[in-house]
Image: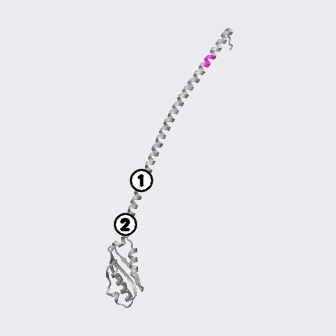
Amino acid sequence: MIKLNLLPPEEKKILALEKARRWVMFYGSALIGLTLVLAVLLSAIWLYVHTQLKTADTNLVTAQASVRGQDLKNQQNLITQLNNKLAKINALQKKRKYFSPLLASLAELVPGGVHLEGLSLSDQGTAVLSGFAQKREQFLIFRQALESSPLFTDVASPLTNLTSQTDLTFSLQFKFNPETLNK
């Protein structure tokens, strides 16, 4: 196909310039439009991401406060449990019986030749003592020392303790002040 252009050269230039201007206007406006659409999309994405970050920060702060609160509650519970256990231990220590002073006083009264084999103490202040004496006189000295001691009262000795002169196995019952066990 043959194209004939019968326009004068100046008109041809104006027409070419007009055509170029239209192309520039078309592509320029399309480029500006696309830039505006892209800017709107980027703004929407930025707003969405910014909102999500704010929400995540708020959730993080809330979660951290909750964890701190739970840790504080857990620590308070542990402290309360520890205090309860310490109170129980303290109560047990107050009820604790100290046999050492009573046993030391009893040991000071035992003469040579007398050996103690068993001692049973009750919370009510009664005691049963069994032992062995090489001679009856040593047993009588021990019994007399118990009777004269201010810590021990109502010393009872069965008659069977006096049946043998030597190698005497004996048993005594006596009372003591139960308060001496609490010191």
Please provide percent x and percent y for residue 56: 48, 40
In the rendered view, does 26 fall on the left or right side of 123? right
Please provide percent x and percent y for residue 10: 67, 9
Quadrant where the N terminus lies? top right
Is 86 situated above or below 176? above
Q: In this picture, which residue range is highlighted in magenta? A: 20-24
Q: Hey, what amino acid is under mark 2?
A: Lys
Number of marks in the image?
2
Is 12 situated above or below 50? above
Q: What separation in Å lies between label 2 and label 1 (alpha carbons)?
A: 27 Å
Query: Which residue occupies the extreme left position in the image?
Result: 154
Q: Quadrant of residue 183?
A: bottom left
Q: Quadrant of residue 87?
A: bottom left
Q: What secondary structure is marked by label 2?
A: helix
Which residue is denoted by mark 1 in the rendering? 76
Please provide percent x and percent y for residue 98: 39, 72
Q: Quadrant of residue 131?
A: bottom left
Q: Is residue 37 magenta?
A: no
Which residue is at the front of the view, 155 or 164? Answer: 155
What residue is at 41 percent from the left and 54 percent from the top? 77
Q: Which mark is residue 94?
A: 2
